[in-house]
Amino acid sequence: DDDNDTAPDAIDCAPLNATASGIPFEVADLDVAGAAPTAITYTTQSIGSGTRYELVSGRLGRLRASGGFQEDFCLASTVNGGAGIDTRPAPPPGDGWFYLVRSFNACGRGTLGSAAADAPGAGDVCPAGVVDQDFDGSPSDLDCNDNSAAQSPLNIEICDNLDNNCSQGVDEGNPGGGMTCGSNVGTCSFGTTLCSGGSIACVGGVAPGPELCDGLDNDCDGTPDNHVIDTDNDGLDDCADLDDDNDTVADTADCAARDATAFGVPFEVQDLDTFGGSPTTISWTNQSIGSGTHYDIATGQISVMGTVDFATGGCLPAVTASPAFDSGAVPPPDIVRYYLVKSRNACGPGTYGTAGRDAHPACP
């Protein structure tokens, strides 16, 4: 007994290694109990003090689908004794974990119980370091991201901007799309769901909006002209209020009935005049069409031939009332600068006076 392990050399599979005396064989009495954690128990083998146990696991659902053990992984590569613990979460409803155990020592490795379980790619997962690091039931050698349970060949693709099923595509097949969404009540109309940018959107339909006083069901709750807003917060909803924006002009004569800054349509500015010098003063008659009225001031040069190309003109900063000032340098002799002024508010823009002048570039 060269290694003094009490087994004579003649029957010792490792006569010079005191940690092994018998060849590993199939583990008996494997049992599991509970979930998260799961206790795995089995009968140990008296074949040497160096005998250890590999615990292999996988999902029953994948075992049934593939007909083999090629998607298993190493739960524990070296267990000393007859018990192990699986701390992973419970598998999805209707599925389960399977467990295989085999012994190994200096004389070699035992069997996991069948040729299929012992086959390359299945029986060598522990020596190869194939694990399930993210606890999703997919082995690390097949998982495109073993740090995230949201990505696994076992998953179905969902709309989240990730490659859930490890197909090297993101949100392929429009997951969650193609369904009817929205409503067809009132002014609303049905749309269709679409996976876009990792989230489901309802496209192609008309969504609810604020209820307006127009005889229509704008918020699509089944009743027209209810929940109408009170634009000016005077206690009267817009259906009952004759001046919705409280700008003293009745809605019937107000071109922007829900905007208190405008009630009159801009028209051609009158009495435009300039006063030379630096700065040059530009004055006109202000228009009483709302507190939000602004005046665009266009400028440019008149050529020595007396022609004007309004399309190449520029702008001075807009102002809210007359006068305005041009602080630019006084033009040299024989050069004349022109000025145009037009009003604008929430009801729209006015005019510089002619179609040719209105060809001037829009002012900011």
Image (cartoon, rainbow, N blue to C red):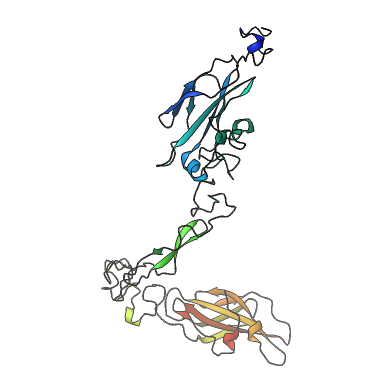
Numbered-mark total: 0
Closer to us: 211 or 50: 50
Q: Is residue 164 above or below residue 207?
A: above
The residue positioned 36% from the left and 80% from the top of the image is 254
Vertical comparison of 87 with 291: above or below: above
The front one of 211 and 308 is 211
Q: Quadrant of residue 301?
A: bottom right
The residue that appears at 48% across and 53% down in the rendered structure is 158
Percent coordinates x, y for residue 132 in the rendering: 55, 36
Above or below residue 50? Residue 302 is below
* Residue drawn at the location 58% of the way across and 15% of the way down: 47
Residue 32 showing in the rendered view: yes
Position of 16 compared to 115: left or right?
right
* Image quarter (top left, top right, bottom left or bottom right) of the C terminus: bottom right
Q: Is residue 73 visible?
A: no
Q: In front here: 159 or 295?
A: 159
Residue 17: % across, % down: 67, 13
Q: Position of residue 225 (x, y in %)?
A: 28, 71
